[in-house]
Image (spheres, helix red, strand yellow):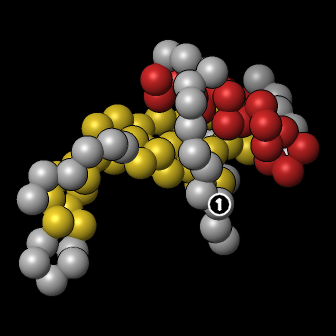
Amino acid sequence: MTCGGEFLKIQPGTGDALSPDDIANDYTDYVIWNRFKPVCLDIDGELGMECLDSGMVLLMDPIAALQDDILKEVLEQAYGDRSLDTVFLLGD
């Protein structure tokens, strides 16, 4: 069975991907995003996914202080539009 739509996964970085240049430019943190498209739903309920794109948003402030701005920046990078109609599912 073919599935439609996409999933956008956003997660905080671990801190090990900042380059010396990033640090010299005052970046202190980052988030990683991935766009996934479901490709099929197996008979046993497994959902196969294809990674369409991914990226990283560099931050100069703590993640908690910038949550709305981060989401807008990720939407801009991933889809070229900050104002997409979206549904956010948040988790730990």
Name the residue rendered at 65%, 54% in the picture. Answer: 12
Residue 9, above or below 80: below
> In x, y percent, where is residue 65?
90, 44
Looking at this view, name the residue that lies furthest to the bottom: 44
Q: Secondary structure at mark 1?
A: loop
Residue 81 appears at what percent x and percent y?
Answer: 55, 17
Instruction: Say how many tags the image has.
Output: 1
Is residue 7 at least partly visible in the picture? Answer: yes
Position of the C terminus, as image quadrant, is: bottom right
Kindly identify which residue carries mark 1: 90
Residue closer to the observer: 22 or 13 = 13
In the image, taking residue 61 as reference, residue 2 lies left or right, namely left
Q: Where is residue 23 shown, x and y percent of the image?
A: 74, 34
Residue 23 visible, this angle: no
Residue at image coords 36%, 43%? 6
Q: Residue furthest right?
A: 65
Residue found at the very far top of the displayed protein: 80
Task: Tell me the quarter of the picture where residue 4 sits.
Answer: top left
Drawn side of residue 28 relative to residue 31, left or right = right
Question: Foreground residue, 26 or 59?
Answer: 59
Residue 49 percent location from the top left of the image: 24, 56
Q: Amino acid at mark 1?
A: Leu
Q: Is residue 51 left or right of residue 91?
A: left
Q: Quadrant of residue 56?
A: top right
The answer to which of 58 and 87 lies nearer the viewer is 87
Around disc 1, counting alpha carbons within 10 Å, would you say few (fewer than 14), some (14 to 19), or many (20 or more)?
few
* Depicted 52 relative to depicted 50: above or below: above
> Does residue 58 appear left or right of residue 40 in this picture?
right
